[in-house]
Image (tube, rainbow, N blue to C red):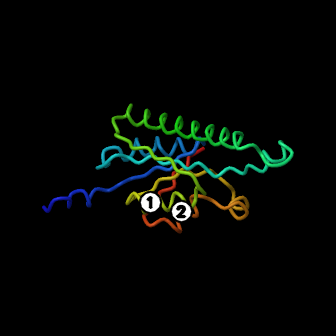
Amino acid sequence: MAEGEGERTKKRVMVAIDESECSHHALEWTLANLRDSLSSPLLIYTVQPLQNVSFLAAASYGSPPPELIRSVQEYQQKVSLALLEKAKEICSERGVVAETITEMGDPKEAICQAVEKFDVSLLILGNHGKGALQRAFLGSVSNYCVHNAKCPVLVVKKSG
């Protein structure tokens, strides 16, 4: 086998998470059902959505001070890092090596871009349980990724 050939045949699995219960369930499902078949570190990915700071402008009667915007962004970063740290701890407790990644942007697009960027072979998402009407008006990250990600997408739905 040529050098590096084994690396290319490894399947990379990525679980995209947020603070929701369905996202936590998708991670737990992955660890329970795919743990033995993971050949490389499990990628745990979260996206910090670009926050709409227009409410800050309204609250400050004009342009919000840069310190306030920076403070909101720093808080968002802390929340994302804490979420990833907890997910990594859950993986460690189950004997799974995990690599965590956080990026900013629109979750739908950022997840699909990350699939390509990190050469992901399987993307796993939790199902937020939106009804057909909500999906039609608000869109769905899982629906978007199923149609646009450059790899198979597994959407884990919590029963009950």
Residue 57: horizontal and vertical position, in percent?
80, 47
Q: Badge 1, how many Cα within 10 Å: few under 14, some, many 20+?
A: many
Sequence order check: which comes first, mark 1 or mark 2? Answer: 1
Residue appearing at x 35%, y 54% in the figure: 12
Q: Are marks 1 and 2 in contact (CB under 8 Å)?
A: yes
Horizontally, is 54 left or right of 158 in the view? right
Residue appearing at x 28%, y 56% in the figure: 10
* Quadrant location of the N terminus in the rendered image: bottom left
Amino acid tagged 1: Val
Q: Element type at marker 2? A: helix
Amino acid tagged 2: Cys
Horizontally, is 113 left or right of 120 in the view? right
Residue 5: horizontal and vertical position, in percent?
20, 61
Q: Badge 2, how many Cα within 10 Å: few under 14, some, many 20+?
A: many
Residue 58: horizontal and vertical position, in percent?
84, 47
* Quadrant location of the C terminus in the rendered image: top right
| Residue receiving disc 2 | 145
- Rendered view: 97 above or below 147: above
Residue appearing at x 47%, y 57% in the figure: 154
- Rendered view: 41 above or below 1: above
Q: Residue furthest left?
A: 1
Q: Please name which of the two marks, 1 or 2, marks the residue nearer to the observer.
A: 1
Q: CA distance from mark 1 to mark 2?
A: 10 Å
Q: Quadrant of residue 71?
A: top right
Horizontally, is 59 left or right of 116 in the view? right
- Rendered view: 143 above or below 62: below
Total marks shown come to 2
Residue appearing at x 43%, y 32% in the figure: 89
Mark identifier at residue 126: none
Q: Element type at marker 1? A: helix
Mark identifier at residue 115: 1
